[in-house]
């Protein structure tokens, strides 16, 4: 099969790394890709949100299958356009992608179909939102309805902070059109969990659990990021918890989307809070998490590509996955200053010693090459140093051994990825 992966981050590198190993794959392309992806696929200079360009390339180059990685092109309808062109595609329709594209839509799905989530209300008027906040008190959560590159959520510890979040979104238009409507919801206490499933419109195939580290600083301090590291499986996802997620959230969500006339096909990523009364939905995402995808795919024993195809073909009931029992853990190396301003184009002088370690893989998230061919950092999150181990502690040890061998002066990372799982296991 001739296959195109759309995207340029660590998630897409992990997908390319996995797909390239499949005997079904005869040629692999990635648009636009990065310097690491170029080791596994032919990179083509088409932006991930250039729907017309992606469709044109897929047609002209006779792609048999397209895997859309990021959420923005899915919400914009890339999967629809590709399917209209007769190209088999992994990823939900624009109508189904509203699960991530509109917080209000996803919350209404939960409310209307009895799926456990935080109490909430939707607002298009700033004064009404503020009145609701003052009535409910703090802590409270304020969310921009649309896509805001992971920056549209404020977990406010005070009423004043929540009111300021309303002003930022609706008056200052910090998030543009994404903040024209807000969801204000109750604060939930518990432990966060990422849960993934392949979905073909009717059947859901649960994948592995994972836990992300969003805050930039150790001990989960400082501003939120796109993710500073992750591990899989997550110890909080016991067999009983996973079954509860499947029974009360995953399967009802799949049924709800079918009932709404927009059946979901692709990967469903459910962000959960494991509360004292059971798992509840924080948010839905319609693509693999990043950096969770990287640790999950390190643990897949089976050929993963047939699962993606079965999802697109509506045949997941015929597909099964096998998993390695080990834990996978990754540490994100980011540019100094991230998630604030940072220098681009800084040289990464050597990765060879790190990748030579047993059970270590480095997925590239934001890399390129300069005119002389030197590997450089082009983004905030740059490298995902990923390792397998018998348990979280061993995977953590191997990952940080590899981190210490990466030669990049402008890089930094958290030093405590996996701490919550290790505390639970000791």
Image (tube, rainbow, N blue to C red):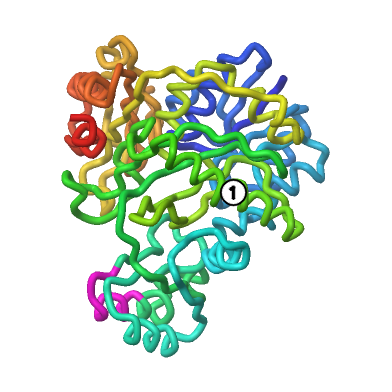
Q: Residue 326 versus residue 409: which sits nearer the camera? A: 326
Q: Is 274 on the left-hand or right-hand side of 68? A: left
Q: Position of residue 299 (x, y in %)?
A: 44, 22
Rendered position, 139 above or below 351: below
Q: In the image, is residue 270 above or below residue 413?
A: below
The boundaries of the magenta stretch are: 156-165
The location of residue 249, given as percent across then percent down, is 54, 51
Residue 229 visible, this orientation: yes
Q: Residue at x 66, y 18 (%)?
A: 27
Instruction: Name the residue rendered at 28%, 32% in the picture.
Output: 331
The residue drawn where x is 54% and y is 19% is 322
Given residues 364 and 414, the one toward you in this image is 414
Can you identify the residue that label 1 sits on? Answer: 49
- Residue 360, given in percent of the width and then of the height, sits at 33, 17
Q: Is residue 160 magenta?
A: yes
In front of the other: 42 or 14: 14
Q: In which quadrant is the N terminus drawn?
A: top right
Residue 412 at least partly seen: no
* Quarter of image, res 211: top left
* Quarter of the figure with residue 193: top left
Residue 133 shown left or right of residue 299 in the figure: left
């Amino acid at each position: 099969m001739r296959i195109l992966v759309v995207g340029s981050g660590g998630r897409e590198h992990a997908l390319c790394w996995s797909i390239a190993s499949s005997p079904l794959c005869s040629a692999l392309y990635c648009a636009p890709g990065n310097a690491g992806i170029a080791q596994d696929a032919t990179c083509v200079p088409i932006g991930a949100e250039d729907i017309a360009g992606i469709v044109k390339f897929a047609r002209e180059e006779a792609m048999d299958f397209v895997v859309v990685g990021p959420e923005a092109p899915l919400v914009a309808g890339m999967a629809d356009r590709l399917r209209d062109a007769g190209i088999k595609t992994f990823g939900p329709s624009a109508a189904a992608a509203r699960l991530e594209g509109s917080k209000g839509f996803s919350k209404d799905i939960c409310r209307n179909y009895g799926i456990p989530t935080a109490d909430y209300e939707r607002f298009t008027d700033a004064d009404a939102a503020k009145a609701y906040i003052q009535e409910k008190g703090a802590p409270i959560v304020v969310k921009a309805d649309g896509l805001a590159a992971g920056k549209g959520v404020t977990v406010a510890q005070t009423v004043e902070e929540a009111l300021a979040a309303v002003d930022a979104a609706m008056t200052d238009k910090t998030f543009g059109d994404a903040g024209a409507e807000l969801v204000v919801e109750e604060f939930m206490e518990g432990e966060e969990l990422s849960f993934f499933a392949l979905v073909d419109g009717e059947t859901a195939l649960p994948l592995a659990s994972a836990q992300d580290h969003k805050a930039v600083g150790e001990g989960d301090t400082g501003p939120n990021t796109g993710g500073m590291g992750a591990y899989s499986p997550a110890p909080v996802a016991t067999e009983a918890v996973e079954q509860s997620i499947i029974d009360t959230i995953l399967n009802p969500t799949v049924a709800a989307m079918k009932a709404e006339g927009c059946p979901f096909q692709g990967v469903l990523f459910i962000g959960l809070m494991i509360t004292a009364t059971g798992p509840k939905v924080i948010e839905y995402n319609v693509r693999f998490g990043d950096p969770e995808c990287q640790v999950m795919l390190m643990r897949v024993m089976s050929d993963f590509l047939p699962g993606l195809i079965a999802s697109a073909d509506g045949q997941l009931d015929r597909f099964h996955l096998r998993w390695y029992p080990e834990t996978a853990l990754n540490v994100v190396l980011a540019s100094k200053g991230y998630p604030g301003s940072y220098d681009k184009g800084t040289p990464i002088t050597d990765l060879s010693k790190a990748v030579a370690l047993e059970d270590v893989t480095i997925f590239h998230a934001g890399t390129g090459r300069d005119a002389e061919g030197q590997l450089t950092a082009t983004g905030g999150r740059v490298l995902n140093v990923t390792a397998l181990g018998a348990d979280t502690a061993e995977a953590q040890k191997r990952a940080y051994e590899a981190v210490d061998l990466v030669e990049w002066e402008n890089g930094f990372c958290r030093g405590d990825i996996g701490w919550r799982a290790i505390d639970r296991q000791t």
